[in-house]
Amino acid sequence: MAVEFEKEDGILWFKLNRPEALNAINEDVVKAFRELINRIKTEKDIRVVVITGSGKAFCAGADIKMFSESDFFKAREIISELGKILDEMEDLDVPVIAAVNGYALGGGCEIAMACDIIIASENASFGQPEINLGIIPGLGGTQRLSRLVGWKKAMELCLTGERISAKEAEKLGLVNKVVAAEKLEEEVKKLAELIKSKSPYAVGFIKQAVNRGYKMGLKDALQYERDLFGLSFATEDAREGIKAFVEKRKAEFMKDRA
Ligand code: COA
């Protein structure tokens, strides 16, 4: 199977599993991403998703062998489908953590950037090497990257195709945290558990306010935040969270999403 799904106690692990091709993205991987979105929408007990890779790569980008057999229409269709899926993933109410265990290149770097938090192992590396193939990034490499690391740095990374280490990526603000390779799973699990302990409504509203707001002008984004604040205030979890504080006890939030 190109991707392995494993759900454990509200955390859905989505593991790219083509280690022989450094988890390169082919049509099966794109289909698995579609399944991921469908599962998030229908399985309300999923509270956090973790995307990771097997072997020495997170994902080395689009499958170049597949590209060698694709014409313009086919290549555009595959990339457009995954691009729309990544946009949708950003808009859903479940946080997605990228556990970057190795190479995150091209589409791999772009998948990580569409996740909400990126935790990388110290041996991971990032880059947009498409230029070496005579093409350009198609899944956010020229867009999300410049918003994350700044305009000029993104330009340099895309124009040179050079790889950067996890530590450099952390300094640039592309990665939230770098951890020892053998601690990656444990650290990501700890983070997922912490997020899971919060109200699923508040988590969902925050994700949507940050991600959708990021794509709006500031005035509209601030209005959107105020609207979502109002909605969060109307939930049972808001009543419980505020009451628990006053009563000096731990809040008992809902376990599943609405
Ligand atoms: N698509 C398809 N296969 C890929 C791949 C990709 N994007 N990246 C790596 N592979 C395959 C290699 O062809 C090789 O297969 P083989 O054993 O059948 O020859 C296998 O994965 C291992 O890769 P290899 O190059 O031997 O590993 P490495 O550690 O020496 O180098 C990279 C790793 C990531 C630096 C190198 O594989 C690379 O540059 N890959 C392409 C990255 C890229 O351009 N991505 C953007 C695509 S649009």
Image (tube, rainbow, N blue to C red):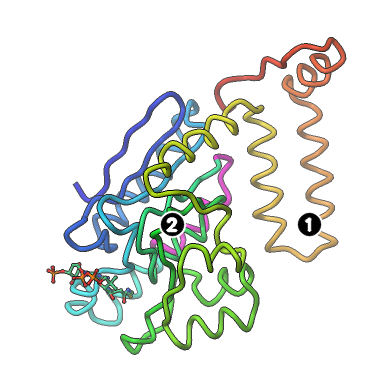
| Disc 1 residue: CB within 8 Å of ligand 1 | no
Q: Residues within 10 Å of mark 1 (few under 14, many from 20)?
A: some
Q: Secondary structure at mark 2?
A: loop
Decide whether residue 86 is among the magenta residues.
Answer: yes
Disc 2 from disc 1: Cα separation: 35 Å
Q: Which mark is residue 122?
A: 2
From the viewer's side, name the closer residue of 211 and 115.
115
From the viewer's side, name the closer residue of 196 and 135.
196
The C terminus sits in image quarter: top right
Q: Is residue 2 above or below residue 246?
A: below
Quadrant hosting residue 131: bottom left
Q: Which residues are magenta?
A: 81-94
Q: Amino acid at mark 1?
A: Ala
Image location of residue 71, percent across then percent down: 24, 81
Numbered disc total: 2
Quadrant hosting residue 111: bottom left
| Sequence-wise first label, 2 or 1 | 2
Quadrant hosting residue 248: top right
Q: Amino acid at mark 2?
A: Glu
Question: Which label lies toward us, 2 or 1?
Answer: 2
Image location of residue 94, percent across then percent down: 55, 40
Q: At x 28% / y 55%, what residue is drawn? A: 29
Look at mark 1 in the image and give the residue it sits on: 221
Q: Are discs 2 and 1 less than 8 Å apart at CB? A: no
Image location of residue 122, percent across then percent down: 43, 57
Q: Secondary structure at mark 1?
A: helix
Image location of residue 38, percent across then percent down: 41, 41
